[in-house]
Image (cartoon, grey):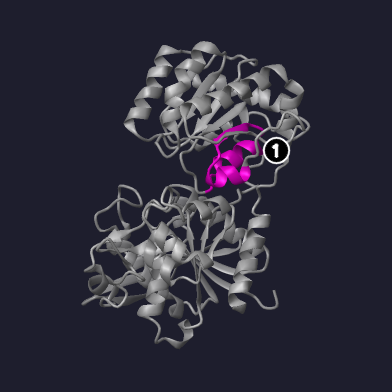
Amino acid sequence: MSQVMKILFATSECAPFYKTGGLGDVASALPKALKQKGVDIRVVMPYYTSMPQIYSEQIEDVTHFYLKMGQREAYVGVKTLVLDEVTYYFIDNHDYFDRQGGLYGYEDDGERFGFFDLAVIEMMQYIDFIPNIIHVNDWQTAMIPVLLVDRYHWIEAYRNIRKVLTIHNIRFQGWAKPSILPEVFGTGFNTYHMNGVMHKNMVNFLKGGINFSDIVTTVSPSYADEIQTPAFGEGLDGVLRANHFKIRGIINGIDYIKNDPTSDPRLVANFNTKTFKLGKAKNKAALQEKVGLEVNPFAPLLGVVSRLTDQKGMQLISEKAEEILETTDAQFVVLGTGDAVFENTFRYFENRYPGRFCAYIAFDTDLAQLIYSGSDIFLMPSAFEPCGLSQMMAMRYGTLPLVHEIGGLKDTVWPYNQFDGTGNGFSFAQFTAYDFANVLRYALWLYHERQDDWDQLIRQAMTTDFSWDHPSDDYITMYEELLRS
């Protein structure tokens, strides 16, 4: 880069401060990777009062001001914290972000994040940081590009800011009544049309972001293509096809420092590509003992770390688990929470097959790492998957993923080829329980009958590069092309 690039990265969540899903991981890891490559990137998010105390004690106040929302004014506090050399800003307003039930899911979410989007734009002039590019994520920040064009075009310093939107999951779009435009955004109805924010007689935040951004990225190349079809576009496929020229797919990475089998303190035994047989055996035994499975080094252990929902393909597992348990020696450990029907089904299997099936209905990051490192096969048969991080984590720890060939799973898991030995996991093309069970049986056969091939697959999985090094280069290239255009 000939000059230091200035990026403001706007997100509704970011680990380790707050995290509900993959966005929190990406918002943490990508800015760090870009910072290490010389980009002046700063991250801004809401100041939820649920922030862990270890970080809230380090927060410093920067400034405060009032912004106009329709006919009223709202208080904006700006706080900051530097962590791992990245500067984070937090937008403070207790009315909107002091909630006890989680980050999202409130009746006034449109107003809450409408306020946040306005505050982010106004904040830039108060902190003396006008970026070359503002990079927004998902519906919660998608109105920022709209507002920069419609409400703030008169501010000369803002006119040349380029706008990038990343869609992490198109299912969540941000719907609001049209009255939100004058009452919250103070924009009138200038953008309320089919090429703006209007969709099905409502305001659709994500649609506005797609139409008003310069570039729209998704978190895998396959997902970029899939969401332009009716099957996966969640009603916005036509909008995306109309904007196809601005759509890019860049695969996510995972944090290689936090997820390192050679040093991870959450494991019982650390290991590398040369010592994985002994290391994984120790972690497997510890996992079996911890979750109440029979401690059996020969039984293939199938791991699941997931939200227990249809999107994650839990219906395939619940339909075929009993058959697999009755006809093979496999064990299951399922970690996660979600739909009651799946939670109860997996509890039933645990009761019927003691020592063979564990349903750990909870959120436990330490246990998750032990499942990644101690399992033999990682099941991830998602119906759709924008990118997915769990399959990459599993491979990093030498556990072979079994996935549905969709989205980011298709882009990261290459099925084993018995003729030339290539691959790093297993996959099936048709989203049916029959196809899922067939490839699982094939994987179990390989586990028992071709141990040398199995071990080589583990080495190939562990050495596949899922770090942020290449994706961050792709983002820098995209940013540079955008600034030249």
Tag 1: residue type? Met
Crowdedness of circle 1 by 10 Å Cα count: few (<14), some, many (20+)?
many
Measured from the top left, where is residue 188 in percent x and y?
25, 77
Measured from the top left, where is residue 227 in percent x and y?
46, 53
| Residue 410 falls within the magenta-colored stretch | yes
Q: Quadrant of residue 410?
A: top right
Image height check: is 171 above or below 397?
below
> Which residue position is annotated with label 1?
462
Which of 112 and 464 lies nearest the eye of the viewer? 464
Identified at 47% across, 30% down, the residue is 432
Identified at 54% across, 18% down, the residue is 331
Q: Quadrant of residue 259?
A: top right
Task: Work out which quarter of the rendered image holds the C terminus and state it.
Answer: bottom right
Q: Is residue 380 at all visible to an observer of this figure?
A: yes
Measured from the top left, where is residue 378 in percent x and y?
57, 31
Image height check: is 16 above or below 96?
above
Magenta segment, which residues?
Answer: 387-412
Image height check: is 187 above or below 404?
below
Q: Is residue 390 left or right of residue 37?
A: left
Task: Work out which quarter of the rendered image holds the N terminus and state it.
Answer: bottom right
Measured from the top left, where is residue 147 in percent x and y?
37, 75
| Residue 479 falls within the magenta-colored stretch | no
Q: Quadrant of residue 179?
A: bottom left
Q: Is residue 265 at all visible to an observer of this figure?
A: no
